[in-house]
Amino acid sequence: MKILVAVKRVIDYNVKVRVKADQSNVDLNNVKMALNPFCEIAVEEAVRLKEQGVATEVVVVSIGSKSCQEQLRNALALGCDRAIQVEAEDGPDSLSVARILAKVAEAETPGLILLGKQAIDSDNNQTGQMLAALLDRPQATFASEIKIEEGKASVTREIDGGLQTLKLTLPAVVTTDLRLNEPRFASLPNIMKAKRKPLEVKSADELGVSVSSNIKLISVEEPAQRQAGIKVSSVDELVEKLRNEAKVIA
Amino acid sequence: MSTLVLIEHDNKTLSPVSLNVLNAAKQIGKPITALVVGSDCANVADQVAKIAGVDLVLLADNAAYEHQLAENVSKLLLEQIDPDNKGADAARFSYVLAASTTTGKNILPRVAALLGVNQLSDVMAIESESRFKRAIYAGNAIATVESSDAVKVMTIRGTAFDAINAEGGAALIESLSNVHLSADIEFVEESLAVSERPELTAATTVISGGRGLGNGENFNMLYSLADKLGAAVGASRAAVDAGFVPNDMQVGQTGKMVAPELYIAVGISGAIQHLAGMKDSKVIVAINKDEEAPIFQVADYGLVGDLFDLVPELEGKII
């Protein structure tokens, strides 16, 4: 079985985000970029499935400008076999991304498609679900456990009240949650090896998808800052304040 | 043109977050149709029909919808929005809303893709008919976006809107008979936490514990205080990752967003990812032994000291 993993290049999760002075967007100039953490978990899961002998090949795909090749090489160093970059302007909307991924999936015919549940920049949490709908295939979002047996994927999902397990007929789309696995670090020999693994470049036009969006970013602002309050010196003082000043307890 | 709201429920009772979503729908200002999808869920439809502001209730009650699987519910929604398959421009609804919960997030993007439109996720303010605000970068920036899609598909952040009045309405209930059942997906099991305490996102008081609690057993201290205050108990990601408590208790950007009247953070340092999930609370109390902990920068009342002394003392002094 072949696994297709879709990944996104985003701001490194350790970097503090700053809004540009003109409020047009956040400032990404000279900011460290990285593989989206949820995508990294998806890569790790695909590689583990290959190591277990469940998958035979892991193909990683990313959509964006040439700079996303850095993240594709990173995924190759983590154990993916080959990569596809679909050249497009950075920051296409989720529907365009899902349409491009659907075309890639039609050509590659993977048994399983893995994606992160959301990117930590746009926080949309949409692409996997949209892709599954376009392909008319089943989905399991927010996965914390994946088992593949006899053409089916048994997936445990993290839902609001607890956990839910679904059984999906492959091919299927699964999006990863935080607790699915702990991604490995790429070793130096594997980073060197990754440089020689195949990386194919395609364009969105070639795939017959025009990247556009009906959602326009008008402005970006800093969230309202909360002011630090006071330190109380005892439980008695706290209870008194909560009762008489904040009036939140009886 | 009107607004379609996907109602969240467990086949028996309406989930409180739906009242917040309905308020967002009310702010859009178009007639509101509420869709109840489930199995043996006529009770829920009755509850929804009584909500002031709901004009029509659509009820799809069938065993096939018992677990509200996205594959089936999305097709049912599509059929309601675009019955003649003519595309978004000819749709019966111009807005489609659901709560930004794991259910809403699971279903709605499928609907958007089938309609060929984008989705606005986790909307926190309705600025106009086409302008909305939503948080990006884990709540570190707020984006104002404008959608020119013919159908605006949106998940709504419940804590950003007040609940609508659950009484005073008398909407008609219309039953839908078409059933969509995908053969490629099967529900196996569900393990839901059973608790006598209020649901985290709906509670007026929330007490959360962090790594400072040391282990899962020590959370009993928080449960005991919570029962006295009628509060829900949450946790930081650090406490969840350390295995102290299950993941459904996690408050934060990757967990639940809460905005209670009173939030008490116990043994929580205040990582950005946690603050993103609770900083809209009205009053924040922090109890931590490290007086430099970032949580104190957002707390209205900070108490520095050993939580193992302070929490029982607090419980004893609350009536």
Image: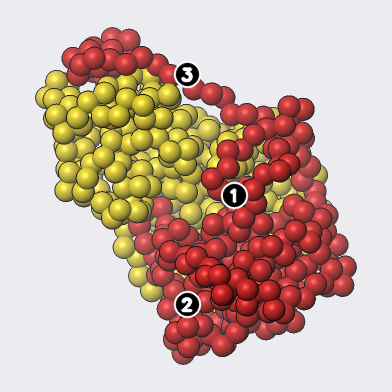
Chain colours: A red, B yellow
Q: Which mark is first along the chain, 2 or 3?
A: 2
- For label 3, the residue is A227
The residue carrying mark 1 is A12
**Residue A233: image location, x then y, percent:** 24, 14
Residue at 33% across, 51% down: B240
Q: Earlier in the sequence, mark 1 or mark 3?
A: 1
Q: How many marks?
A: 3
SS at circle 1:
loop
| Amino acid type shown at disc 1 | Asp
Question: How much space separates mark 1 and mark 3, taking CA atoms?
Answer: 27 Å
Q: Amino acid at mark 3?
A: Gln
- Whether residues under marks 2 and 1 lie with C-beta atoms below 8 angstroms apart, the answer is no
- Compared to B176, does A17 lie above or below? above
Q: Which residue is mark 2?
A: A48
* On screen, residue A117 above or below B286: below
Q: Residues within 10 Å of mark 2 (few under 14, many from 20)?
A: some
